[in-house]
Amino acid sequence: MTPAPPTTSAQPTALFVRSDYLILGGGGLAVALAALTHFVGGGAVLPFLCSAVAVTLLASLVGRSVEQLGDRFGPGATGVLQSALGNLPELFIALFALKAGLVAVVQAALIGSILANLLLVLGLAFLVGGLKHGTQQLNSERARGIIVLMVLSVAAMVVPSLAHYVHTPAAAHEKTLSLIVSVVLLVLFALTLPASLRKEAPAEGAGAEGAGAADKMEHEAPRWPVWLAVGLLALAALLAAFVSDWFVTALEPAMKALSISDAFAGLVIVAIAGNAIENIVGVQLAARNQSEYAFSVVINSPIQIALVLAPLLVVLSSVFGFATLTLVFPPMLVVSVVIAVILTAFITFDGESTWIEGAALIAVYAVIATSFWWG
């Protein structure tokens, strides 16, 4: 009987695979085109499209570099690192937008990122995974823990909006209230960090499917040496800072040329471009029947936005003297994010996902996005 071939971990692997070349080559070309159209000119729409593609590919390069660091820093630390660095392009875009006075775009982008992950990306993951593998199982205890943290963090983030719209005495102090809430959320993130760094434990009780997924993850050994992964990570972060500035510069002319409202631009375009990593990785994991990992990747992003990105932007806008960002969001944005959180919690609390649930989440996202087309 012919012996089974060795696992991929036992075979010599190439330093780069086809997808690496696509990300590196495509990213380099997109950055070059974005620079060319920014400095030389290319009309109102072309610079925006080039810079949007460049931001997306740089975000993918950040994700790939962190992935190639593997478990050298531990699985939990690697997961936290990917979540934090994955939001770098979005952080840069938001800071440059605030510098340009585009507060409405930033507010819509923050809520839009949460909506895109909870409805669009999670919906795509459920849809693709469900059509390919049928009903997929989530670790219900772990899913409940993640969902509860998400509900609490988003709830705290929208409290200043509620105080404003019900005309409480705190409404007259929305900037101070937003700063206090932001500090509280950042402290909450710091308190949850040790638990995030201990992500090795869930694999032990994740059941047969989780164990199988963990085994598969172990066989996919990093191909890049540490110096290369760290070097490309630093390069991607540096380029993302420049490209984000070009993206924001091109955003206003493109919105006028295409008759796109500030709300729709932030809610859909900026949000999807800034969350390229979760968009791709979450769906890929679901397609491989690694539903629990897909769920964690997708849901951790809105948690990071509510606990870190939004509060950090509120603080930095005050520190740098940019246009003031508060946590008082327009009513429609607040209602939309509440709907998204409730739907996601209701669908995932049973520890299972089906393709029809994914299709329903995508449909809700399409309806909400359409409602913002006119502003």
Image (tube, rainbow, N blue to C red):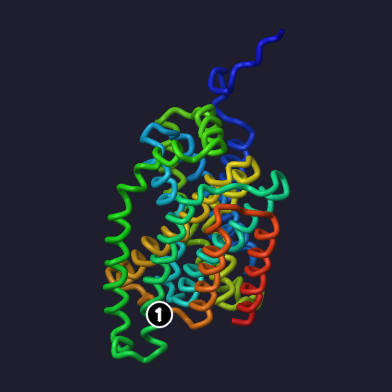
Q: Which residue is drawn at 44% across and 43% down?
A: 235
- Residue in the foreground of this view, choosing between 347 and 7: 347
- Residue in the foreground of this view, choosing between 11 and 249: 11
Left or right: residue 81 versus residue 368 is left
Q: Kindly tell me whether residue 362 is visible in this rendering.
A: yes
Figure check: 2 above or below 374: above
Q: Kindly tell me whether residue 256 is visible in this rendering.
A: no
- Residue in the foreground of this view, choosing between 229 and 164: 164
* Residues packed near mark 1 inside 10 Å, few (<14), some (14 to 19) or many (20 plus): many
Q: Which residue is drawn at 58% across and 21% down?
A: 7
Figure check: 74 above or below 273: above
Q: Quadrant of the N terminus?
A: top right
Q: Quadrant of residue 127?
A: bottom right
x, y percent for residue 87: 45, 55
* Residue wearing tag 1: 328
Which residue is farthest top?
1
x, y percent for residue 265: 57, 71
Figure check: 118 above or below 214: below
x, y percent for residue 55: 54, 54
Q: Residue at x 49, y 70 (%)?
A: 111
